[in-house]
Amino acid sequence: MSAPSGHGSDPDLTPMLDMVFQLVTFFMLVTSFKSAALDLTLTLPVAGSARPVDSGGKDKLLILNITPNGQLSLYGRAVDVESYIDGESQVSRMTARREGKEIAVGGDLPEVVVVRADRTTPFSMVNKVITSCQKHGYRSFAMRAMNKEGAP
Amino acid sequence: MSRKRKSRAQAAVALNLAAMLDMAFQLLAFFIFTFKPSPVEGQISLRLPPPQAVKAKADPSVKAGSSDSDKPAGVETLVISVFATSGGRIQNLALGEGAVANVPQLERQLTTVLADADLKFEQVLIQVSPRLQYAELMTVIDACTKQKLPSGQKLTKLSFVELPEGEGG
């Protein structure tokens, strides 16, 4: 029953550091900051034929969250529909010009408009957003929905 | 000289891992707190033509060959009307001028009409009451996008028109 020796007992931190780095790597790989653009408070409608589509990042997306009272929600704050879509279409045309493609005002824009509207939003509000997008040259739309009731 | 070199080589180099571990834990905490798994959402892809006055065929049983001359050749529009209750639910449905009882019946009728190669329908115009809830509209869109054209392509060309307020079918 001798007392512990006075020698310092440094724990070997290497395995713990290995494990922590593995965890950090895991979270770095699975974290997607793109999902920050999605308003997760919205309850999407259910449509049986809605399928998850992964374009592998090739498609340029314009995500529009439409709240039940018809407001456009961008990173949690309400924005004006007309001015926001106008601004985005101008950015799209400028980007195309930089890539050597000229798109006239009202011409077809390459972005896919992702409509994430709450299931209780009246059609008139959704139609206002869609019509504004069409007026500015957006043609491809993706209506987001859950493919089964109660999905997260 | 050689004795000095030997003693240097034998000295153990102890890395202080505590600082690195602190930093790694801070990074880990950041990722844990900001981690929010995004839900797996499905989507219905649509090609929505720009708003334009489309003269629709009133009766789907009318053959395409007898269509109006101001329509683009070969492009026919099938009209679906959706009327809403005051609560925003579907009250009445109509395909052309014919009443349809519900969405499953609409789907069956669409399958019949769109499968007919003589009726060259290529797009669908959905007239909707302004107060119809988006979830209800999606059931109609769902019924449309399940359809295939005689060419084998999926029906993706849809247009929406808002019916005047108070129109109840």
Image (spheres, helix red, strand yellow):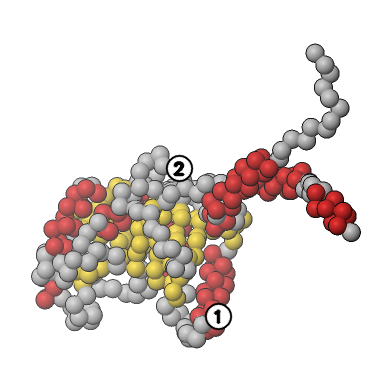
Report how many numbered discs are placed on residues in the image. 2
| Residue at the (54%, 64%) spot, across then down | A81
Above-or-below relation of B22 to A62: above
Residue toward you, B82 or B159? B159
- Rendering coords of residue A5 (x, y %): 84, 25
Q: How far from the left and from the top, in percent, is residue A142?
A: 40, 61
Left or right: B162 as drawn, with respect to A101: left
Q: Amino acid at mark 1?
A: Met
Q: Position of residue A17 (x, y in %)?
A: 67, 44
Work out whether mark 1 precedes mark 2 in sequence or the reverse, and give the earlier one. 1
Q: Nearer the viewer, residue B119 or A38?
A: A38
| Relative to B43, residue B70 above or below | below
- Residues under labels 1 and 2: Cα distance? 37 Å
Q: Indicate the secondary structure of the residue bearing disc 2.
A: loop
Image quarter hosting the N terminus of chain A: top right
Task: Identify the residue under disc 1.
Answer: A94
Q: Examine the image and state in which quarter residue B113 appears.
A: bottom left
Q: Quadrant of residue B80?
A: bottom left
Residue B117 x/y as whole percent: 11, 68
- Residue at 52 percent of width and 75 percent of height: A92
Whether residue B60 is visible here, answered yes or no, is no
On residue A152, which mark appears? 2
Answer with the quarter of the image where residue B161 lies: bottom left
Crowding near pointer 2: few (<14 within 10 Å), some, many (20+)?
Answer: few
The amino acid beneath tag 2 is Pro
Q: Is residue B122 visible?
A: yes
Judging from the image, what secondary structure is the residue with disc 1 in? helix
| Chain of the residue where label 2 is placed in the rendered structure | A
The disc placed on residue A22 is: none
Seen at 40% across and 39% down, the residue is: A150
- Taking depth in this image into account, of A20 and B45 the one nearest to the observer is A20
